[in-house]
């Protein structure tokens, strides 16, 4: 599933490409998730070589494994292919990918669950490492209702002795209050960006796209955004550390994401929220994501 030209969701189509040959680790894809970056690539907002198979996230089974790579045929695996950097899109029947960046799917997760996790999860882990949250700090997370925001929220709320306020759309307030239950971190659920206290937070993490909230950071604090197309002008607050974080391939971080999700599934029965469609309906997923208001992940199956 990919594009031969950029444009609206209608440019998405099935591409007939040769299967990867037997060289290297080849994964038979069971499920591949749609992320906002796929929409930006399809529209041409982010340039990519054409034709392009889209997609960053996948889960499937090993179809071919080179000797000594640590995997054998049939193993359940997941990966973030970082399509823009590697040229490898995840929305294909077979994907050849570097085994160094592939991890096993824990038993507690099915392949649809696993496909929903990599990009959002790895980005969350890396962003929080970039902005460590220490005891006593006050944090604002913008867009906690999104896929990335949700991954950030559960990790932030598990920090004891910190205050994490979650800024969400009004319709998401109830679900985000439920997310807080039983977790050690304090804080409130906010729904009106205009009422966010100015210069009050040690750290603001923006996973939604609200550049004006750089004003909510206290002097000497940090504004970390994950949304490059809605980043504030850092000159606006020279007294604030500005970070535009971009995800990087990292097997250990992906393994951490898989283990965290397996723990949530096993111990709390919490699984990624997914809507499954066939590859051929990718345009439908792109349309609904572009319209806004969708919650969870579209996961496409060949
Ligand atoms: N830097 C990186 O490496 C990296 C990695 C992954 C993702 N991202 C970016 O991070 C963002 C979130 O990704 P995602 O996978 O979580 O997407 P998602 O599941 O579609 O969630 C995005 C959420 O942001 C909300 N939102 C949009 N504008 C907002 C605003 N001004 N204030 C508050 N919330 C707002 C959306 O709400 P509505 O639906 O109601 O509009 C939606 O719930 C995207 O821009 C994505 O491109 C960056």
Image: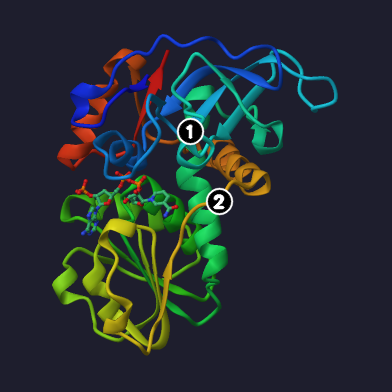
Q: What residue sits right under mark 1 in the picture?
A: 57
Is residue 266 placed above or below 208 in the rendered structure? above
Q: Residue at x 18, y 42 (%)?
A: 292
Is residue 14 placed above or below 135 in the rendered structure? above
- Looking at the picture, the colour scheme in use is rainbow
Which is more toward the observer, 205 or 272? 205
Q: Secondary structure at mark 2?
A: loop
Mark 1 close to ligand 1, CB under 8 Å: no
Q: What residue sits right under mark 2 in the picture?
A: 248
Q: Residue furthest front?
A: 49
Residue 169 sits in quarter: bottom left
Is residue 230 placed above or below 187 in the rendered structure? above
Q: Position of residue 127 (x, y in %)?
A: 50, 61
Can the viewer see residue 220 in this picture? yes
Q: Residue at x 52, y 63 (%)?
A: 128
- Is 156 left or right of 273, judged from the image as shown? right
Q: Position of residue 255 (x, y in %)?
A: 65, 42
- Is 169 left or right of 227, judged from the image as shown? left
Q: Quadrant of the N terminus?
A: top left
Q: Residue at x 18, y 30 (%)?
A: 8
Marks 1 and 2, the one that precedes in the sequence: 1
Q: Position of residue 105 (x, y in %)?
A: 63, 29
Q: Quadrant of the C terminus?
A: top left
Q: Position of residue 80 (x, y in %)?
A: 54, 37
Residue 287 sits in quarter: top left
Q: Secondary structure at mark 1?
A: strand
Q: How many marks?
A: 2
The local crowd at label 2, few if under 14, some if 14 to 19, many if 20 or more residues have their Cα within 10 Å, is some
Which is more toward the observer, 276 or 262? 276
């Amino acid at each position: 599933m990919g594009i031969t030209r950029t444009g609206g969701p209608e440019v998405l189509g099935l591409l007939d490409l040769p299967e990867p040959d037997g060289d290297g680790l080849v994964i038979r894809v069971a499920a591949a998730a749609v992320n906002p970056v796929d929409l930006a690539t399809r529209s041409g907002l982010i340039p990519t070589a054409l034709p392009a198979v889209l997609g960053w996230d996948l889960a499937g089974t090993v179809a071919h494994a080179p000797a000594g790579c640590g995997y054998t045929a049939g193993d359940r695996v997941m990966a973030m292919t970082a399509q823009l950097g590697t040229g490898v899109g995840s929305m294909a029947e077979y994907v050849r990918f570097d085994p160094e960046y592939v991890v096993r799917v824990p038993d507690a997760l099915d392949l649809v669950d696993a496909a929903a996790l990599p990009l959002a999860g790895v980005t969350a882990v890396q962003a929080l490492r970039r902005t460590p949250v220490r005891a006593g700090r006050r944090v604002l997370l913008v867009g906690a209702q999104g896929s990335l925001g949700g991954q950030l929220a559960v990790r932030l709320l598990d920090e004891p002795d910190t205050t994490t306020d979650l800024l969400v759309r009004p319709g998401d307030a109830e679900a985000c209050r439920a997310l807080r239950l039983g977790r050690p971190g304090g804080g409130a659920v906010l729904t009106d960006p205009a009422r966010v206290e100015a210069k009050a937070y040690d750290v603001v993490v923006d996973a939604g796209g609200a550049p004006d909230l750089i004003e909510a950071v206290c002097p000497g604090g940090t504004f970390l955004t994950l949304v490059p197309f809605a980043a504030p002008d850092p000159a606006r607050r020279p007294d604030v550390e500005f970070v535009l974080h971009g995800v990087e391939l990292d097997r250990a971080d992906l393994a951490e994401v898989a283990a965290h999700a397996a723990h949530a599934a096993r111990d709390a029965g919490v699984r990624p929220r997914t809507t499954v469609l066939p590859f051929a309906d990718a345009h439908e997923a792109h349309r609904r994501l572009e319209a806004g208001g969708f919650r969870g992940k579209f996961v496409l199956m060949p």
